[in-house]
Amino acid sequence: MEEIPLWYWLIVFFCVGACVGSFYNVIVYRMPRGISLINPPSHCPLCKKRIPIRYNLPIVGWLWLRGKSACCKQPISVIYPIGEALCGLLGALALYAAVGFGTDFTRPVLSPQTWANAAALFWLLLGAYPVCAVDCQYKLIPDSISVGGIVAGLLISLIPGGITPFQSLIGAVAAGDGLYLVGWIATKVLKKEAMGFGDVKLLAGYGALMGVTGAVETLIVAAVLGLLVMVPYGMIKNRKAAKDSNEEEGGQIPFGPFLAVAAPFMYLWGDLLMVLYLTHVLEQ
């Protein structure tokens, strides 16, 4: 480990991220359709033939086939390699942010805390992809990301230097139960469902990864981002509805993507943002 430079680990994180992105493509396609993530194995959605492993390589497989399936020569959406490449870049960014950025790519990565932060950021950054893709379209959050975040947080807490297993467990319980309580109260007041259980599980996963404080900060920032988007969106929808009485009422914007965007930001800069808020807003 001492002789392995940062640039090498960045390549490793990119490759692992691209592989995870390939799996997330499966989640985005299969999960909303109720198809098992394991069975059947990867196959062509048109002719149903199984895809050989050599063509399943992230990014490379699509380039190798020139964007067409090997079996029936039908076009393969460019969304797949783009998602894999994006996840690869986010994977490398997770480690790069954990080491504090910088320009010295020859330095080794030695600190256990750095590895703990890199693992947590890896999950937070890459998890935003399926959360945003699925929740925006289907109003669902994959359990593999929300519940998986709880498991990942508890496992990452075993790495010395990050949050402790106790802090991770309390973070998951407090964040999940707290948001559930808020949603329950809002539902009673508004007389309609105000918070999906998927959001509750997602924040519980963030609590396991970030602790109670990080989860609360994430919830606050996500709520602010949600208001900044939902208020103009609601005004536009009302204007359209007033002009066209036949237009159907659009669904609400899901909250999961706001949580997914806020989480890695608050993991990295939550403490700094809190200091700036106390200094310049509350003047303490």
Image: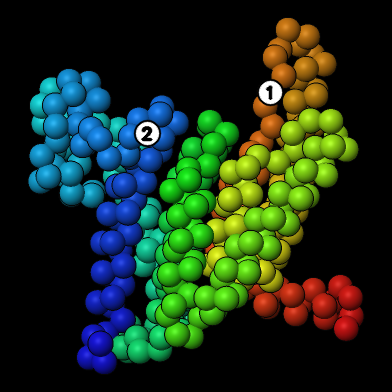
Direction from residue 251 to residue 90 in the image, left or right: left
* Residue for point 55% across, 65% down: 208
Measure the alpha-carbon separation of dots 2 and 1.
23 Å
Q: What element carries label 1?
A: loop
Direction from residue 107 to residue 229 in the image, left or right: right
Name the residue carrying label 2: 29
Q: Which amino acid does label 1 sit on?
A: Gly
Q: Which of 265 and 65 is in front in this view?
A: 265
Few, some or many C-alpha atoms within 10 Å of disc 2 (few <14, some 14-19, many ≥20)? some
Spot occupied by residue 101 in the image (x, y as percentages of width and height): 45, 79
* Residue for point 73% across, 7% down: 246
Establish if 49 lies above or below 80.
above
Direction from residue 223 to residue 121 in the image, left or right: left
Q: Evaluate if marks 2 and 1 touch, with contact meaning CB atoms under 8 Å apart.
A: no
| Label 2 or label 1, whichever comes before in sequence order | 2
Q: Which amino acid does label 2 sit on?
A: Tyr
Direction from residue 80 to residue 28 in the image, left or right: right
Name the residue carrying label 1: 250
* Residue for point 33% across, 59% down: 17
Establish if 255 lies above or below 29.
below
